[in-house]
Amino acid sequence: MTSEIIRTEHVVKTFTVDKKAHSVLKDVNLSIETGEIFGIIGYSGAGKSTLVRCFNGIEKANEGSIFFEGQNIVGLKSRELRAIRRKIGMIFQQFNLMPSRTVFGNIALPLKHSGLSKQQINKRITELLELVDLPDKRDAYPSQLSGGQKQRVAIARALVNHPKILLCDEATSALDPKTTKSILYLLKKLNKELGLTIVVITHEMSVVKEICQKVSVLDKGKIIEHGDVYSVFSNPQQELTRSFIETTSALGSVKALIETQSPVVQLQPGQLLLKISYTTSSVSEPLISYISRTFHVDANIVFGDIQILSGNPLGGLIVILSGQKSAIDRALEYVKQRHVAVEVLNHG
Ligand SMILES: Nc1ncnc2c1ncn2[C@@H]1O[C@H](COP(=O)(O)OP(=O)(O)OP(=O)(O)O)[C@@H](O)[C@H]1O
Ligand SMILES: [Mg+2]
């Protein structure tokens, strides 16, 4: 059984600067289920941070509703909002730790008026330091920590009140690829072990691919595409989504090879340069050898990029096909019938 933790309906957010109104969120509708890792991707200025700040009421939506566990938080008084905020943890790109406090002091900060005893606070922080794998950094200051360690402290601080959901705003954007992986791995672990719902805001498709189950693409304040990550990656509907996906796939680099007239993609008369890509999760047959044998065409694989996403193959091959025109046509027809997308990139 799944249930909705956050639902937005027709959310509009406008900022007024120098008496001029700027619509930053325009009719945003989305639904986040309890227990999932949900990605929101978009370029800089799309409105991602504004949207998540509306989720915990730091920003007030001008129109529409935002339901947290069924309760509309738009228009709530600050006292009621504070109670809701305790159930929502948040982490940021720049970690936002207090430089004058130790790791312990930073994590303990949200417990200030909690009424917990010193002993209880100690116990909770010891647990959290174990959870984020920093047991020996309890007395260190932020300046003595690496970026990855700082983000682990920020995660521990965000979890101190046992929130139901963790909002991550570009949480790995300041980290190198290896540290990014280790933080994403930690988020996955928290999702699994604590059943924590996680919202990941990012401009990097590789982050979405690594940990999210669902993704919404935000562009100029609107959700332009949404779905489970495999469907969106294998069959993107919008040009913007395609441009994000190309950043994670080597197949995109073929365009540069064509433009620079690289010898690897030079064609003889009659040859076709094709991109063959998976669009469903069911393809596993040896397609290339089959079409060569059956239709008497030659298929030269220039390069390929096939990755496994959610347990299914995703990606494709760049192929030069040669042979009789009628044979090539029949081979292409066959490939299309197998629900494999074929794009003719160039003719000889
Ligand atoms: N407090 C504010 N006052 C006025 N304009 C704002 C305010 N906050 C954000 N904006 C504007 O809203 C738009 C969206 O900003 P937002 O920070 O939500 O984008 P973003 O998608 O998070 O971008 P980035 O990837 O760069 O973090 C931008 O044009 C920004 O200038
Ligand atoms: Mg932002």
Image: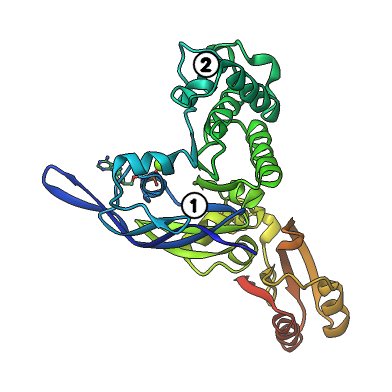
Which residue is tagged 1? 41
Ligand 1 shown in quarter: top left
Residue 347, image x, y percentages: 62, 73
Q: Is residue 311 above or below residue 54?
A: below
Horizontal relation, residue 279 to residue 238: left or right: right
- Amino acid type assigned to the residue bearing label 1 in the image: Ile
From where the camera sits, is residue 113 visible? yes
Horizontal relation, residue 56 to residue 309: left or right: left
Q: Mark 1: few, some, or many residues within 10 Å (few <14, many ≥20)?
A: many
Q: How many marks?
A: 2
**Under 8 Å from ligand 2: the CB of mark 2?**
no
Q: Earlier in the sequence, mark 1 or mark 2?
A: 1
Horizontal relation, residue 147 to residue 210: left or right: left
Nearer to the camera, 282 or 123? 123
Which residue is tagged 2? 105
Horizontal relation, residue 240 to residue 269: left or right: left
Residue 117, image x, y percentages: 55, 19
Camera-near label (1 vs 2) is 2
Question: Judging from the image, what secondary structure is the residue with disc 1 in?
Answer: strand
| Quarter in which the N terminus is drawn | bottom right
Q: CA distance from mark 1 to mark 2?
A: 33 Å
Q: Is residue 304 above or below residue 192?
A: below
Question: Judging from the image, what secondary structure is the residue with disc 2 in?
Answer: helix
Q: Is residue 340 above or below residue 41?
A: below
Q: Is residue 274 above or below residue 42?
A: below
Residue 46, image x, y percentages: 38, 51
